[in-house]
Image: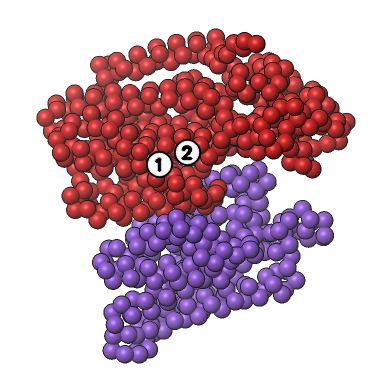
Amino acid sequence: MSVRVTRSRRPATWSGLASALVFVALLSLPYLVFANVTSLLVNLFILLVLATMWNLLAGYAGLVSVGQQAYLGLGAYTVLVLAQNGVNPFLAIPVAIAFCAVAALPISLLVFRLRNEYFAIGTWVVAEAFQLITVRFPQLGGGTGASLPGLGGFDPALRQAFTYWAALAVLAATLLAAYLLLRSRLGLDLTAIRDDEVGARSVGVQPARAKRIVYLIAAAGAGGAGALIIISQLNVQAASVFSVQWSAYMIFVAVIGGVGTDPGHDPLLQPPAVAGGARRLVPDHRRDGRGAGGDVRAAGPLGRDQRPLRPAPVSDRLLAAPTRLIAGGPAGPPASTRALNCRISTKTGCLQRCKWHELDKTPPVNVHCAGRSWG
Amino acid sequence: MAWLNAVVQGILLGGLYALFACGLSLLFGVMRVVNLAHGDFAVLAAYLGLAVITGLHVPLLWSTLAVAPLFAVVGYLVQRLIIQRSLEVSPLTTLLVTFGLSVVLQNAMLEGFSANSHSLPSGWLAAGSFRLTPQLSIGHFSLIVFAAAVVVIVSLQLFLSRARLGRQIRATADDAEAASIAGTDVRHVFGIAAAIAFATVALAGLAFGGYSSFDPGAGTQRLIFAFEAVVIGGVGSLWGTLLGGVVLGVSQALGAQVDSGFGVLAGHLVFLAVLAIRPRGLLPGRVT
C-alpha cells in the first residue's frame, strides 16, 4: 500500500509565498527608513524569536521553562568572548547558537529530572547560577558588565543595518525551523504528546527524546536572541541579560498571541503564538484543517504518519456533542487518540479501538496492550 | 573556629529558609500549585510590616500580630478568586497565573514604594546576642527566627495529622473528588490551606526584613531559596523542608566563608548536586 504524504497544502504554499514577499520587503528596510525604526524592529525580532521558541517549548513539548534567559546570557557572553579574541561579532552569532544547543544537553540531563512546576523553577535556578558564575570572571566584566569590542571600525549606519539584517536572519531561521520542525515526524510526535502523552507513548512516540530535542532547539534560539542583544546594545550586563524579566516577556508574547478556544487542551498553550504577519510562517493546526478530521480518522492506525493530527473540525464537534449527551459518558478522548479511533480504557489503561461515532458508549475492541502491535 | 561559626550561622539562616519554604511546600502538597509569587508576597509582607512599625511605633515582633492575620485573609482571597479559577483550567495555567501575579506585584511595589531598599528596624533584637566563645555568638534575632520556624513546622505537622480541618486538608490533597463526596467543601479547604501558607509567608517576609534589606525586586531570589529548600529536603515532607533549609543555609554560609561572593552560588551548586544525585531530595516524604 502506498500512502502519499502531504504536510503542507495550498493555503500554506500561498502564505509561504506571501511570507517570502514580506521577508524581501523587510530586507530592504534599512535603505528606506531611519535607524530608529530598524533598531525598534531589532528589539521586536528578538522578542519574536524568544516567544516562538518558548511557544515550541511550552506549547508543544509541555516544558514550561522560566529559565530560558540562561541561554540568552550564554549566547551574549559567547559573542563577547569570541569578539574579545578577534572574531567578528556578526560571525560569532551562529557559533553562539550552536554553543547554546550543545550546552543545553548536559543541563537538560539535570533539569529533566524535575516535573512541571518544579522544572520551571529548576531552570530558573540554572539561569541564576549562570549569572552568579559569570560575574565571577573579571574578564567578562564582572557585575558591572562589559562592552563589545570589534564593531568600532564600522560606520554607525552600516553597523545598524548589519545588526538589523542579522536579527532578521535569526528570526527567519527561527520561524523556518519551527515550521519545518512541526511539519516533521518530530512535530507529529509533539502534537500527539501534547494531546495525550500516554496515548502517544503507546503508539511508539518517545516523549523524553522529543522533548529533549525541542529543549536543545529552544536553547539555540534563545542563544541567537542573546547574541543579537549584545550586538544591538554593544554591551552586556549579567544582571540584565540573565534577568527573569526575559521569561516574562516571552510568556506574555506567547500567551497573548496564542490564546485559543479549542477544547481538549489548555487554551493558554495553543500553538503559534507569534502575532501578525509572522504568524503565517508558523504552521497553525487550525488554519488549513478543513474537513481533515474525517480522513485522519479513516486512516486508522496509520494516521500518525500521514498528516498532522488536528482537533476535529467544528461540524464534527457539533455532531459529537449530542452523541455524548445521549450516551451520558464523559467528554471524548483527546484529539490524537480520537483521531486514531481509539480510546484509553479506564479499567485496564490499554489503548482500545472502537467505531468513532460510538466512541463514548460501546465496549471497545482491545487492540493494543503492553506491546506495540495492532490487533 | 570561623568555620564552626559559619556552620552555626548557616543552621540559623536555614531556619529562616525553612520558615519561608513551608508555605510553598504546603501549597504544593495540597493543591499541586507552585506559587511563583511566593517571594513577592514575602516582600509585600515586609513592606506592610514597615508601615505598621513606623506608623504605630510598635516593635517588629508585635507587627507580626497585625501582618500575619491580614495575610491569611489575603491568601484565602487570592486562592478563591484567582488560583482556584486557574486550577480548574490546567496546572500550566496556574503556573502562568502565579508568574503573572509575581510580575504584577513586583511592578506595583516598585510603583508604590520606589526602588530604594529598606530594612525593618528590629531594635534590641538585632544588637543582642549570646556570646558562647570570643569567636562564636548567636544573635537573639536569628535564634528567635529559627525557633519560630521549628514551632511553625511542628504545629503545622500536628495540625495536619490531628485537627479535623487538617485531616480534611490531607484528604483533599489525596483525592479532591472523594473528599467532596464525603462532604468536604474542597474550595474552602484549599482557601484555608492558602490562608495558612500566606500567614507563614508573612512571618518569613518579616523575618527576612529583619535579617537583611529588601527592595521590590528581592522576591525573585527569595522564591528560589524557598524552592531549593523544598527540593533539597524532599518534596512533600515538612521535616524535609526544615532539613533542606538548613542544608541550604549551611552551604551558603560555608560558601561565603570561602569567598564573600560565593555564598549564593554555593547554595545553587549544592541544590544542583542534590538534584543530580538524589532527585527526590534528602527526606522524600509522602505528600502531606
Nearer to me, A184 or B199 = A184
Nearer to me, B46 or A101 = A101
Percent x, y for residue B89? 65, 43
- Report which colour depicts chain B: purple
Residue drawn 59% across the image and 44% down it? B93
> What residue is shown with label 2?
A212
Residue A185 shown left or right of residue B178 in the figure: left
Dot 1 amino acid type: Leu
> What residue is shown with label 1?
A105
Nearer to me, A372 or B256 = A372
Secondary structure, mark 1, is helix
Residue B116 shown left or right of residue A113 in the figure: left
Choose the circle earlier in sequence order: 1 or 2.
1
Mark 1 neighbour density, 10 Å: few (under 14) some (14–19) many (20 or more)? some
Dot 2 amino acid type: Arg
Shown in red, the chain is A
Say which quarter of the image contains residue B78: bottom right
Mark 2 neighbour density, 10 Å: few (under 14) some (14–19) many (20 or more)? some
Question: Badge 2 sits on which subunit?
Answer: A
Say which quarter of the image contains residue B237: bottom right
Residue B221 shown left or right of residue B23 in the figure: left
Quadrant housing the N terminus of chain B:
bottom left
Residue drawn 71% across the image and 21% down it? A300
